Amino acid sequence: MERQKLPNSTGILVLGILSILTCCCYGFIGLALGIVALVLAKKATALHNENPDMYDGIGNVNAGRIMAIIGIVLSALYLIFVVGMILMFGWDALQDPELLREQLENMQ
């Protein structure tokens, strides 16, 4: 019997990479891509565990899952940072560099 490639193994790898690359887009995009990659990786791993001799490509799934976890952590940290900046300075100050500089000078 010929070994088949796991479904979505390449897609999981791509989503994991994209979750790391897009973590600085206010954290939302990287978080969403990482979660989708984790869900797909869980399904692919379960399929591989049912019949490991039939499927190939578990390395891509594992690498994609690890990158998705890294992407989720980085996105969550960046999202916390952005929310903290908004709470500390306000949305208007983040949009106006002069107002932000003024508020930073007042903090010193």
Image (tube, rainbow, N blue to C red):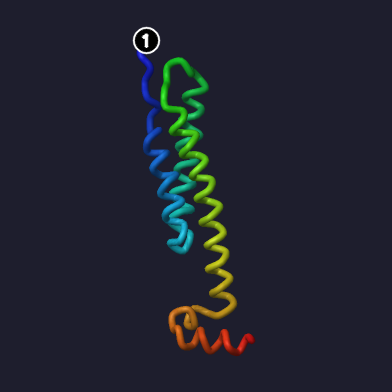
Amino acid type at mark 1: Met
Residue furthest to the right: 108
Q: Vertically, is 85 above or below 107?
A: above
Residue furthest to the top: 1
Q: Vertically, is 83 above or below 14?
A: below
Give how far across and how far down residue 68 sits, in percent. Answer: 49, 45
- Specify the quadrant that holds the N terminus: top left
Q: Does residue 35 appear left or right of residue 88 in this picture?
A: left
Which type of secondary structure does the marked residue at label 1 adopt? loop
In this rendering, the count of numbered labels is 1
For disc 1, the neighbor class at 10 Å (few under 14, some 14 to 19, many from 20) is few
| Tag 1 residue | 1
Q: Residue at x 46, y 33 (%)?
A: 61
Q: Residue at x 41, y 44 (%)?
A: 15
Q: Residue at x 47, y 25 (%)?
A: 47
Q: Quadrant of residue 5?
A: top left
Using the image as rendered, state which of residue 61 and residue 44 is in the foreground: 61
Q: Does residue 17 appear left or right of residue 80 in this picture?
A: left
